[in-house]
Image (tube, rainbow, N blue to C red):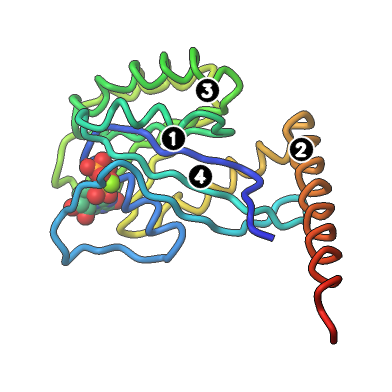
Amino acid sequence: MSRCDFKIVLLGSEHVGKTSLVLRFVNSTFNSGTPYQNTIGAAFCAKTMRSNGKDFNIGIWDTAGSERYEAMTRMYYRGAHAAVICYEPCCLESWARLRHWLQELRTVEEECKVYLCGTKKDLLDSGMVKREVPEDIVATYSQGLRGHFLTSSKTGENVEELFQKIVDDCVADAKLMRNVEEMRVQLLKEEEAYKAKHKEYCNC
Ligand SMILES: Nc1nc2c(ncn2[C@@H]2O[C@H](COP(=O)(O)OP(=O)(O)OP(=O)(O)O)[C@@H](O)[C@H]2O)c(=O)[nH]1
Ligand SMILES: [Mg+2]
């Protein structure tokens, strides 16, 4: 049975670290040696996660941050159950686009659960870069959203925690879970109908 229970979309300016976040979460890897390669359009990844004693398949759309692909991005957050808006605390420019994503999500996907993710925590911790986005502004924006996480794809800090919170929130959403259960029943029926149909032609 191949389908996703929850659809998660990653948004944010280019170079903030969206692809690195997905790769750390799905493959437990970080490509520090390879040069930065911008995502073209979007990429899809899936992973099974456990919440409340059950397994759920989650599908993650890693969108391109470049404004060149902006028209396409809307296509990916349609129907998203959760969105992670990424920014770099050490880059004010990456924060400026955040309001745009929030507005877009509110108009296009009203019920989408929204999370803020400050990336590259390891750089902040090392003192190599200075914070440009003030913490109080982040706190103000986080109000009314589902959460704010500071992550590092290099060390893995808070990456699992971010996605676990998203899945736990989805599982706690009774309306969403009703849809998930209905989808599962529907898929089982389709699978059984398919098997029955093909058995007619099978001689074994
Ligand atoms: N030190 C450090 N570097 C990171 C981290 N996350 C990403 N990077 C680096 O930041 C650069 C951009 O990362 P990507 O994950 O490709 O960024 P992106 O948001 O997917 O970019 P687009 O696809 O253009 O939208 C790469 O050189 C990464 O190695 C992190 O947590 N720590
Ligand atoms: Mg990318």
Q: CA distance from mark 1 to mark 2?
A: 21 Å
Choose top left, top right, bottom left or bottom right for residue 49. Answer: bottom right
Residue pointed to by mark 4: 162
Pointer 3 or 4: first along the chain: 3
* Mark 2: secondary structure: helix
Q: Residues within 10 Å of mark 1 (few under 14, many from 20)?
A: many
* Mark 4: secondary structure: helix
Residue pointed to by mark 3: 145
- Mark 1 or 2: in front is 1
Residue 107 position, x and y percent, is: 49, 12
Above or below residue 97? Residue 5 is below
Q: Residue at x 83, y 57 (%)?
A: 193
* Mark 3: secondary structure: loop
Q: Residue at x 33, y 17 (%)?
A: 100
Residue 90 position, x and y percent, is: 20, 34
Q: Residues within 10 Å of mark 2 (few under 14, many from 20)?
A: some
Residue pointed to by mark 1: 76
Q: Which mark is residue 177?
A: 2
- Mark 1 or 3: in front is 1
Pointer 1 or 3: first along the chain: 1
Pointer 1 or 2: first along the chain: 1
Above or below residue 19? Residue 169 is above
